[in-house]
Amino acid sequence: MSTDLVIVGIIKVGFAVILGVLGAALGAVVVLRAIGLRGVTEQIKQANLAVALLLCSSTAAMGIMLNRSATATFTALDLLVRGGESFPWQTVLLYAAGHLLIALSTGIAVIAVGVRTFMRLTRGIDELREIRDGNMAPALMIAVLIVVVAVLVSPGLQTLLDGILPLPELGRGISISHS
């Protein structure tokens, strides 16, 4: 059993939990605030399904974006462990935190811009008022838009994140598989 691989596995699980619980959930609430929807907790308590749908889609979208942060960080960890270099744990953890912040801020920004742009294109409808009133139709439209934006932007986000972390040089014949 390789101690480095066990430690890397533990770091991956911990990082994934942080991304999922803190990143996606808190990021989703910030996304809704950024598009102008306030009082989400109160709306959920009142069983407003339209608001709940937006919260769910925002959480899923942030999960999609943060998955790219996990992939970029995990690739760097794998390369470092298998590259045979001494393992700079503090540096990797610092970059992991940076990946998390970049993915969160990028996800929130692009989703907010996408939704606000959509709402400007549909001037005859006040989507946020309709959603606060429980109208599911605009909530469905915006929920799908939120997820689509995340799906389309996330590959570019991963490229950005891959470019930030300096990776070790691998010898010939060494490859890393993504599972």
Image (tube, rainbow, N blue to C red):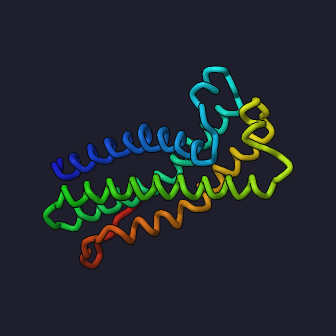
Quadrant including the C terminus: bottom left
* Numbered circles on residues, count: 0
Give me the residue at 31% from left, 42% from top: 14
In front of the other: 62 or 133: 133
Query: What residue is rendered at 69% in x and 26% in y?
Result: 48
Left or right? Give the position of 39 relative to 105: right
145 displayed left or right of 159: right
With respect to residue 73, does 24 lie above or below?
above
- Based on the displayed image, in which of its 4 quarters is residue 75 positioned? bottom left
Q: Is residue 22 left or right of residue 9?
A: right
**Residue at x 25%, y 50% (from the top left corner):** 8
Q: Residue furthest bottom?
A: 172
Outermost residue toward the top in this view: 46
Q: Is residue 13 above or below residue 118?
A: above
The picture places residue 165, in percent across and down from the top left corner, at 32, 67
Foreground residue among 22 and 166: 22
Residue 19: percent from left, percent from top: 41, 45
Name the image quarter holding residue 130. Answer: top right
Residue name at image x 17 percent, y 61 percent: 88
Relative to 48, is 34 above or below? below
Q: Residue furthest right?
A: 124
Residue 15 lies, in percent from the top left, at 34, 46
Horizontally, residue 149 falls left or right of residue 86, namely: right
Which percent across, then down, holds residue 6? 22, 46
